[in-house]
Image: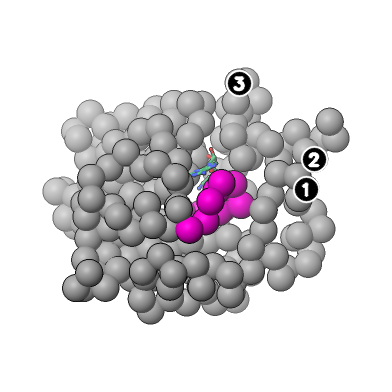
Amino acid sequence: MPKLEIIARQSAHPRGALGHIVARVMALDTARVNRRVLTHIEPKPGERILELGCGHGRTLQAVAERVAPDGLAVGIDPSEVMCGVARHRNRAGIATGAVRVSPGYSDHVPEDNASFDKVFSVHTLYFWPDLSRGLREIRRILKEGGELWLAFHSSEDAVVAAKLPSSVYCLRSADEVTQALVAAGFVEATAPVDAETGVVIAHGRVPSCR
Ligand SMILES: C[S@@+](CC[C@H](N)C(=O)[O-])C[C@H]1O[C@@H](n2cnc3c(N)ncnc32)[C@H](O)[C@@H]1O
């Protein structure tokens, strides 16, 4: 298997000893986009916020600090290695009940209906087995008026598309994601390219009256 494909597969599902190295590199690699997404989310004290595909748990930790003292930050990831790394990084928050990290993925988020104010996911969309299903699952766990942000490289970014193996990465266009958000019942759906980072930061809101 080519080296690039091995790294891509590890990004999609970090495993074993190499997965731990990938977790460290990923935390640095995606830091800028995650910081940018946080400026959109604006976590506030008392909010319940879920990160889908939390990976290393670094952004989750930043969210937990901002929703304190009575909010909740929940991280979901299908990779056992990533859940372990995120739990270790957030051990203080987990001990006080301010953070939870659980296995799960876009098709199945093990949380109650209408239980979160905000959901976000950074660089995971490429690996979702089913875009519509994932968006419906997120809508299910969001409260009325709740918001979702998805940050991803778009298929229209030719430079990035040429670097990512299509055998692992399913790139989508901003339009495709906007339409899928609307079809899943989100309103105010937008998917602009963020000028600072070059990634798309899509946003949708659950209507206040379902
Ligand atoms: C490139 S990493 C990004 C991690 C983190 N969000 C960040 O910005 O650094 C992709 C993460 O998505 C997770 N993932 C893969 N498939 C997923 C899915 N279907 N739903 C949610 N997360 C998924 C992987 O386990 C991995 O931790």
Label 3 within 8 A of ligand 1 by Cβ = no
Discs 2/1, front? 1
> Where residue 45 appears, x then y in whole percent?
19, 57
Q: Is residue 158 left or right of residue 70?
A: right
The type of residue carrying mark 3 is Gly
Quadrant into which the C terminus falls: bottom left
Circles 1 and 3 in contact, beta carbons < 8 Å: no
Picture coordinates of residue 142, whole percent (x, y): 27, 58
Residue stretch rendered in magenta on the structure? 121-132
Q: What residue sits 71% from the left and 70% below the top?
A: 156
Percent position of residue 14, x then y: 59, 31
Identify which residue is drawn at 36% across, 69% down.
Answer: 185
Residue found 22% across the figure and 40% down from its top? 98
> At numbered mark 1, what does the secondary structure look like: helix, strand or loop?
loop
Marks 2,1: beta carbons within 8 A: yes
Residue of label 1 = 165
**Magenta-span inclusion, residue 123:** yes
Task: Name the N-terminal-most of marks 1 and 3.
Answer: 3
Q: CA distance from mark 2 to mark 1?
A: 7 Å
Is 54 drawn above or below residue 45 in the view shown? above
The numbered mark at residue 4 is 2
**Real-space Cα distance between discs 1 and 3?**
21 Å
Look at the image and tell me whether residue 57 can be seen.
no
> Which residue is rendered at x = 58% and y = 60% of the image?
152
As for residue 66 lying within the magenta part, the answer is no
Residue closer to the observer: 132 or 143: 132
